Amino acid sequence: MSSDAGHTTQLHDWLRELQQGKADARNKIIEHTCERLRSLASRMLRIYPKLRRWSETDDILQQSMMRLHRSLADVYPDNARQFYGLAAMQIRRELIDLSRHYFGSLGLGSKHETD
């Protein structure tokens, strides 16, 4: 069994536990997927090159993980694909919120010139 297959099987088991209402399943899922989500956040941050001056991958990851943890209280993905889709949506929302924060009409980044 490859490590990817083992990763997906373990994630599927914890998603099933989450659907059954086990309290610690959310924490296990977040901990288990942290490195993959860090990689995903890094790739998604490349779409926002100006934002890299103000935020790092780990900042994006931390806020996204908090969003994901909250959303897993209400949404129960059936499989790994749905879970990673939900995680990507939370990362995207964080990137959009940070862009608005820094580059909105009153944002610090909109008034700062970088060479």
Image: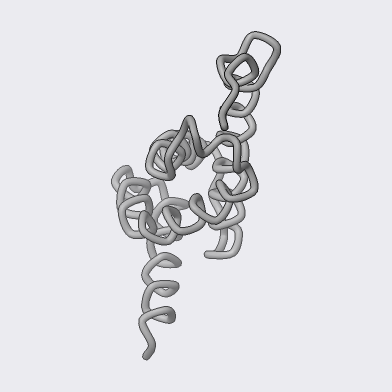
Could you tell whether 22 is left or right of 60 in the image? Answer: left
In-front residue for pair 44/52 = 52
Count of residue discs: 0
Residue drawn at 38 percent across, 43 percent down? 58
Farthest residue to the right: give it.
Answer: 105
Farthest residue to the top: give it.
Answer: 106
In-front residue for pair 60/54 = 54
User: Percent from the top left, x then y, of residue 61?
Assistant: 43, 43
In-front residue for pair 102/44 = 102
Q: Is residue 16 above or below residue 19?
A: below
Check the picture and name the quadrant holding the C terminus. Answer: top right
Could you tell whether 81 is left or right of 28 in the image? Answer: right
Q: Is residue 9 above or below residue 29?
A: below
Residue drawn at 40 percent across, 46 percent down? 21
User: Percent from the top left, x then y, of residue 110?
Assistant: 64, 18
Q: Is residue 65 above or below residue 40?
A: above
In-front residue for pair 29/108 = 108
Farthest residue to the bottom: give it.
Answer: 1
> Which quadrant of the figure has residue 102?
top right
